[in-house]
Image: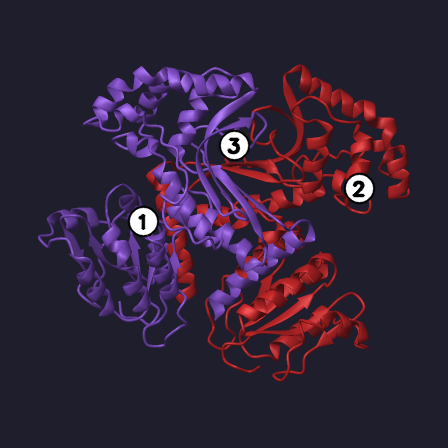
Chain colours: A purple, B red
Amino acid sequence: MSSVNQVYIAVIGAGGVGRHFLSQLSVLSHKVPNISLVLISRSTKSLRASHRTTPLSLETWEKDLEASTSPALTVDQTLKFLQELPDKRVLIDNTSSQDVADAYPAFLNHGISIVTPNKKAFSSTLDLWHSIHESSYRPYDPYLGRGLLYHESSVGAGLPIISTLKDLIDTGDTVRRIEGVFSGTMSFLFNNFAPVDGKGGKWSAEVRKAKEAGFTEPDPRDDLNGVDVARKLVILARLVGLQVQSTESFPVQSLIPVELEGAESGEVFMERLGEFDKQMDEVKNEAVLEGKVVRFVGSVDVGRRALKVGLEKLDKAHPIAGLEGSDNIVSFYTESAGGAVTAMGVTADLIKVIQRVS
Amino acid sequence: MSSVNQVYIAVIGAGGVGRHFLSQLSVLSHKVPNISLVLISRSTKSLRASHRTTPLSLETWEKDLEASTSPALTVDQTLKFLQELPDKRVLIDNTSSQDVADAYPAFLNHGISIVTPNKKAFSSTLDLWHSIHESSYRPYDPYLGRGLLYHESSVGAGLPIISTLKDLIDTGDTVRRIEGVFSGTMSFLFNNFAPVDGKGGKWSAEVRKAKEAGFTEPDPRDDLNGVDVARKLVILARLVGLQVQSTESFPVQSLIPVELEGAESGEVFMERLGEFDKQMDEVKNEAVLEGKVVRFVGSVDVGRRALKVGLEKLDKAHPIAGLEGSDNIVSFYTESAGGAVTAMGVTADLIKVIQRVS
């Protein structure tokens, strides 16, 4: 496995997303033969390939990890392990760990590429953001290689939001406004609670239904506090150049009734949520009286440097109102039109070619 | 300009899209210093850089091309010119020429990358499609380099449709159905002719308005015949693996009244279009009676290998019904959900890293 074109892959986190990723990597490895899985580390255990000899098995990794007696690697140990491998190393961080995120600059500075859905790396302090991006934009170093950084899934959930925004910026378009529904959970809740046809159930019943369908975190307050949407918005705003300090620098509406913020568990919260259905009904009915629907929206007004997360009343014909299921949507309002837009597609493609041949 | 990292760029077509592209390339060249523009060729004139010495000026190209006495290069001459340059050459084909498209395999086989919005390359014969893709998927050759192929703008018009579809396929998702409004012109016409609120003008008046606003081809029949949408659909269907022979292998509804197909000019067509408003009103009213709106939709049912382009009646809450202006929309209906979707974003990112470091 020491071929010059070998790409060495280390995976931290082997839970929900991590497990799906490893199964997709197994499919990919049949088409891309130069992939070598060299490390899997989760909270309690780890599995390492012997350097430059045999990669880990993508077929039996789950059993092999279970049988491993090695404890989880610290972030430093992971970095050291990857440093000892030749060029072309990728860290896949499938955790939501702040510790791992804090070490991204160190990985990138050693020429190790990073692919991750971890929002914390890009939505916590502005200092970390700058440090990560300065490290990933270093020029190619023939000894260290170059650390590339991709984090589409930190915002996208299947939609190519970050890559589209980067293409707009790289090709010289001006983004005026970003607006969308950035949470599958919030989408599911409001599409059912306040559908365009005016029906829909009680708020607490819809939250319960979403929880039972697996659309919420174990404690639904982790969705309803709006922080997940706020983090995604911080990432997009920073990408367009706004120096947003944190998720606390702008208004984020929480849908947790004040009285239930301190409820001792998710179960207690769910039991008592029905007491507050009247508040949400008022919000819904107010929108209905105006011929509108209520949705949980995140927006960035770039010119005014204003971010906002919370309930909005929208026309029924608004693209957001027509969402279904747990779908996300995002709109970029930009300056270009017509032939310039087609040309931007061409220029964005050219940038990808240059990145691959340079 | 003979640095090892220099990327040599030849541009064919310097009209609408070509001119916008060159202006974006000028902006890009300030950020990416290793770009050398070496050729601009349009229908009557061309401008070539002296090999390996001074690239063309991105500031004065328009005046320089005007002053040039060199005739347009043939496709063979263009290929020969690029062959004589070192590795890392990109042909930007901003034409809609079948001749240029037919030569893509030759360019790619010589390690020249291609970036283009030219639909004809990918929607004419299935043989050409296979020939182009076999040439672009050749392994890297240290002498010739490798010809990469990007053609987002052949379908997208600003939306990342092809790259998203490729990511879905590359990460192992199964695409069941593709559906959308693939024409800015058709979008503009129907959003105004049959808006969700039930109003809207006469069909011929809306076509005239679209023409005057620059949203149609000089002869609007070139939009109304549905062929542009059909071509885009062929490209997407072939990308998911369907062996579609041509745009004539499936039903494509033309909105040109049979009586006006032979009208001698676009002007005559426009003058007489009003005689057929009643037909379009009937279509609109039939939809209204069912509480729906009519739109011009393209769809691919992957399982049934069925493509279709034409008028459809849609619920007012359907994402397509809520479009505004000349916006396009496309929906991919796939198999994956939840954690697998997030993991696919990670896997797609990893593929991009591997492509760049390999």
* Position of residue B339 measured from the top left corner of the image (x, y, whole percent): 33, 39
Q: Are marks 2 and 3 in contact (CB under 8 Å)?
A: no
Q: Chain of mark 2?
A: B
* Position of residue A227 measured from the top left corner of the image (x, y, whole percent): 35, 39
Q: Residue at left 48%, top 71%?
A: A358
Left or right of residue B81, residue A333 in this image: left
Q: Circle 3 is placed at which residue position?
A: A320
Identify which residue, A190 or A234, lies in the foreground.
A234
Please tell me in which quadrant of the rendered image residue A340 appears: bottom right
Q: Residues within 10 Å of mark 2 (few under 14, many from 20)?
A: some
Kind of residue indicated by mark 1? Lys
Q: Circle 1 is placed at which residue position?
A: A120
Tell me the element at label 1: helix
Q: Are marks 3 and 1 on the same chain?
A: yes
Q: Nearer the viewer, mark 2 or mark 3?
A: 3
Tell me the element at label 3: loop
Q: Are marks 3 and 1 in contact (CB under 8 Å)?
A: no
Tell me the element at label 2: helix
Kind of residue indicated by mark 2? Lys
Q: Chain of mark 3?
A: A
Q: Is residue B72 above or below residue B318?
A: below
Q: Circle 2 is placed at which residue position?
A: B211
Q: CA distance from mark 2 to mark 3?
A: 30 Å
Q: CA distance from mark 3 to mark 1?
A: 26 Å
Kind of residue indicated by mark 3? Ile
Which of the image's four quarters has the N terminus of chain A?
bottom left
Q: Earlier in the sequence, mark 3 or mark 1?
A: 1
Q: Residues within 10 Å of mark 1 (few under 14, many from 20)?
A: many
